[in-house]
Amino acid sequence: MGTVRPQIAGPYGGVRIDILQSALGVPCNTPPFGTMSAVDLNSRQLLWQVPLGSVEDTGPLGLKTHLHIPLGMPTLGGPTSTASGLIFFAGTQDNYLRALDSATGKELWRARLPIGAVAAPLIYKSPKTGKEYVVISAGGASHSPDVGDDIIAYALDE
C-alpha cells in the first residue's frame, strides 16, 4: 500500500510505500531492520556490519516512542564517505546525521536534525579557507508524516 505526501511549497508529492507491518504498525520480522555494512570487494568478505537507527521517532500505531533504542531501523538514502575514513549517513528512521568510522563502523558522532532526511550528505571544501563541511537536506523521511524544508551544514574538525 502507498500514500501520497505533499511537498511543501511545491506542486510535487512523494509516494510512501509501507513495509510489511503488523496491525500495530511495526515490522513483522525481528531486528535489526536496517544495517550499514562494509565489504572487501577483492576478497568478497564482510568486514563489519552495524545496525543503524533507533525507535526514537517511530513506534506502534504511529506514536513516537522518544526512546533512543538502537534496533537498526529500515533505511532509505545513501552514505557519503571521505578520504579521511568517515562515513556520513542520515537515512535512518530517527532524525540523526551520523558519522561512522569506515574501518570499524563505530559511530563517532551524531547530530539531531529538525526533521528526517533521506538525502545523501554532501561534503564541501571551501576553496578559500580549506575548511570542510558536511551538508544535508532534511525534508522528511518516507515513513513519517512529518515534513520539512531544511538545509543544515556542519563544519568538520581539522
Image: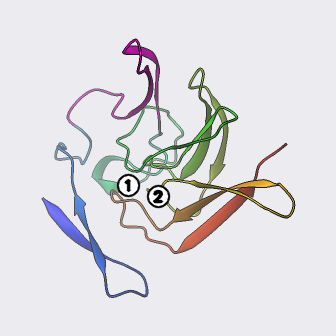
Closer to the camera, 39 or 141? 39
Q: Which quadrant would the N terminus be assigned to in this image?
A: bottom left
Q: 126 left or right of 151?
A: right
Left or right, 87 with reference to 61: right
Q: How many numbered circles does the render carry?
A: 2
User: Left or right of 59: which side holds 65?
Assistant: right
Instruction: Give the secondary structure at mark 1.
Output: loop
Residue lying at 46% horizontally and 51% vertically, measured from the top left: 57
Horizontal and vertical percent for residue 141? 40, 59
Residue type beneath disc 1: Leu
- Residue 154: x %, y % from top left: 72, 56
Q: Nearer the viewer, residue 41 or 139?
A: 41
Q: Tell which of 94 and 126 is nearer to you.
A: 126
Snapshot colouring = rainbow
User: In what element is the residue under mark 2?
Assistant: loop
| Amino acid carrying mark 2 in the image | Ala
- Image location (x, y in percent) of residue 28: 20, 35
Residue 34 belongs to the span the image colors magenta: yes
Look at the image and tell me in which quarter the C terminus lies. Answer: top right
Specify whether 158 is left or right of 134: right
The image position of residue 52, as x and y in percent, is 47, 35
80 lies above or below 126: above
* Residue marked by disc 1: 63
Name the residue beneath numbered marker 2: 119
Span colored in magenta: 28-52
* Mark earlier in primary sequence (1, 2): 1
Up-down relation of residue 25 to residue 11 (above or below): above
